[in-house]
Image (cartoon, rainbow, N blue to C red):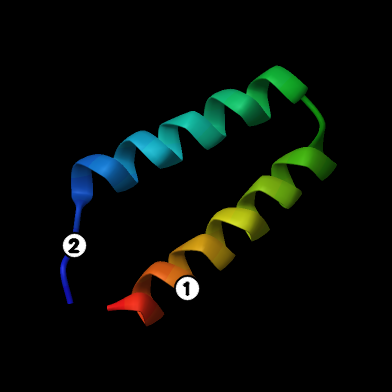
Amino acid sequence: MRVMPKEIASFLAMTKIVASLRGTKQSKHEIMSKSLKNNEILIEGY
């Protein structure tokens, strides 16, 4: 399984920025669930 820390770090930073721009707890939760699903897809892909 390959790990890409730079891409993952930049992706997490981007989701945090988007969450802070939206500013609501609900959107933060949606972003977290989406990022978790994306991470699961990446892990399953390898």
Q: Secondary structure at mark 1?
A: helix
**Percent of width and height locating residue 11:** 41, 40
Where's residue 2, x and y in %?
Answer: 16, 68
Residue 37: percent from left, percent from top: 57, 66
Relative to 4, does residue 28 appear above or below in the rendering? above
Name the residue at the front extreme. Answer: 45
Location of the N terminus (image quadrant): bottom left
Residue 10 lies, in percent from the top left, at 34, 34
Q: Residue furthest top?
A: 21
Which of the two labelled residues, at mark 1 and mark 2, occupies the earlier sequence position? 2
Q: Nearer the viewer, residue 20 or 40?
A: 40
Q: Mark 2 and mark 1 in contact (Cβ < 8 Å)? A: no
Assess disc 2: are there few (<14), some (14-19) or many (≥20) residues with their C-alpha within 10 Å of its C-alpha: few
Tell me the residue at 62%/27% (across/down): 18
Which image quadrant for residue 25?
top right
**Residue carrying label 2:** 3
CA gap between label 1 and label 2 equals 13 Å
Residue at (65% x, 23% y) in the render: 20
Q: What label sits on residue 40 in the rendered view?
A: 1
Which residue is located at x 39 percent, y 81 percent? 44
Residue 3 image-quadrant placement? bottom left
Quarter of the picture containing the C terminus is bottom left
Q: Could you tell me the amino acid type at mark 1?
A: Glu
Q: Which mark is residue 12?
A: none
Residue lying at 76% horizontally and 24% vertically, measured from the top left: 23
Q: Amino acid at mark 2?
A: Val
Task: Examine the rendered structure and indicate whether residue 23 appears above or below residue 32.
Answer: above
Within-10-Å neighbours for mark 1: few <14, some 14–19, many 20+: few
Mark 2 secondary-structure assignment: loop
In this orientation, which residue lies closer to the viewer: 43 or 23? 43
